[in-house]
Amino acid sequence: MRCIGWSVVWAGCAVLQAVAGDWTQWRGSNRDLIVTGESLLASWPEGGPRQAWQIELPGEGYSEPVAVGGMIYITGNTGDKKNREGFLYALEAKTGKIAWQTKYGPEWAASYEFARTSPTFFDGRVYVVGGLGHAVCIDAKDGKVVWSVDAHAKFGGRNITWGIADNPLIYDGKVICQPGGPDASIVALDVKTGEPVWKSTGLSERSAYCSPALLTVGGRQQVVTMLEDSVVGVDAKDGRPLWKYPHRNKYAVHPNTPVLCGKDRLFVSSGYGYGAEAIDVSGGDVKRVWFDKSSDNHFQGVAFYQGRIFSSGGGKLSCFDPADGRVVYTVAGAKKTSFCITPAGMITYDENGGTVMLVKVEADTHAVVSSFKIGYGNGPHWSSPVVADGVLYLRRGKGLAAYAIGAK
């Protein structure tokens, strides 16, 4: 990963820092679904790459693991639909053996009750945000809780239909979370103590399952996210709202982070029949550039790669031209699929049946190279594929497996 300026997210350049080959947070170390610096197999054997290990975790989750310094950190929860508790598990990357586990607090216990938050690793600590709005900092060495903040209680937050689901963003000594309280839709906590640094005064919309991004838009560094009624940008230094653009589908569910896809241009898509759109944010004046009704990404993620937008929506994985919204191609065999893009190609993980594919993607063409299916775990195939140090990690509920995809 990079430690040059504040490019996408500040992930620390200190003791116990992350290095190339690590996956430090949701969507990867640069929070963009793009893996760099890996030497990987150009194709996989029939039936899939060699499985290094497979385990059953004590807790269930939709979240993805993070991989840092030979360790895997992953969340899960246990209990029934009336009472669930969230845990952070630390696993040895070589074997999958659990080194320690720590309870981080009560968890969402109604419908779709598996753990949502993917951990964020920073400077020897791991940060999670639970489904009931608890922001927690845990020591990566021994699993001890360093601090815990009930953000809903502290900021008057209100929960949402299926529980808080944002993944913590860290930069410049701040942890960003979204309790959705009065004048506190978005808040920044001190990364060392959990004390409040700023809150987004003037924004009082609830959270909408979206995880924030740190982007430079209009020449200014901003925290960009989607709330229940709007896409918003707030000043990264003090949380002051800079702009707001209306975007609400019928359920106010917007799990996909807006992606920068050109100078001051953002791609936004959030499912439930609304469609996808590109908006231009210049000097606080926000306007729609184009709109595509046929593609609305539920929660599978979006990436900007080789000058193209890749987004899974409308039952297909599409490659868009960001200039005009033209669909350049759709990826054969990919339907409702999560993905990441590696030096060997795009790795997709489909919700329908757990099909995993390696796809060579370019700006104007693509080719499916290899594929296999996973048969372990429980519940929906809703986690995203993770690649770190030549290993592919795939999760389904309690099931987690590691596949050797390194070229060496």
Image: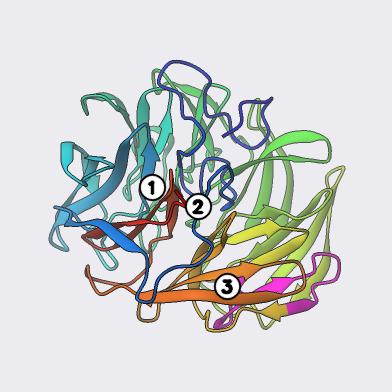
Alpha-carbon span between mark 3 and mark 2: 25 Å
Which comes sooner in the sequence, label 3 or label 2? 2
Q: Is residue 120 above or below residue 77?
A: above
Residue sitting nearer the eye, 13 or 189: 13
What residue is drawn where x is 59% and y is 45%? 36
Alpha-carbon span between mark 1 and mark 2: 20 Å
Q: Nearer the viewer, mark 1 or mark 2?
A: 1
What residue is drawn where x is 49% and y is 77%? 336
Label 1 with label 2: CB-CB less than 8 Å: no
Dot 3: element: strand
Q: Residue 118 carries which label?
A: 1
Q: In this view, does 64 lie above or below 123?
A: below
Specify the quadrant of the image occupied by residue 228.
Answer: bottom right
Q: Residues within 10 Å of mark 1 (few under 14, many from 20)?
A: many
Query: Is residue 110 left or right of 62 when viewed as pictured?
Result: left
Q: Which amino acid does label 3 sit on?
A: Ser
Query: Is residue 90 left or right of 303 when viewed as pictured?
Result: left
Q: State which region is magenta.
A: 311-328
Residue carrying label 2? 206
Query: Is residue 404 left or right of 210 when viewed as pictured?
Result: left
Residue sitting nearer the eye, 210 or 382: 382
* Furthest residue toward front: 408
Quarter of the rendering occupied by the N terminus: top right
What residue is drawn where x is 21% and y is 45%? 95
Q: Say how the picture is coloured.
A: rainbow
Alpha-carbon span between mark 1 and mark 3: 20 Å
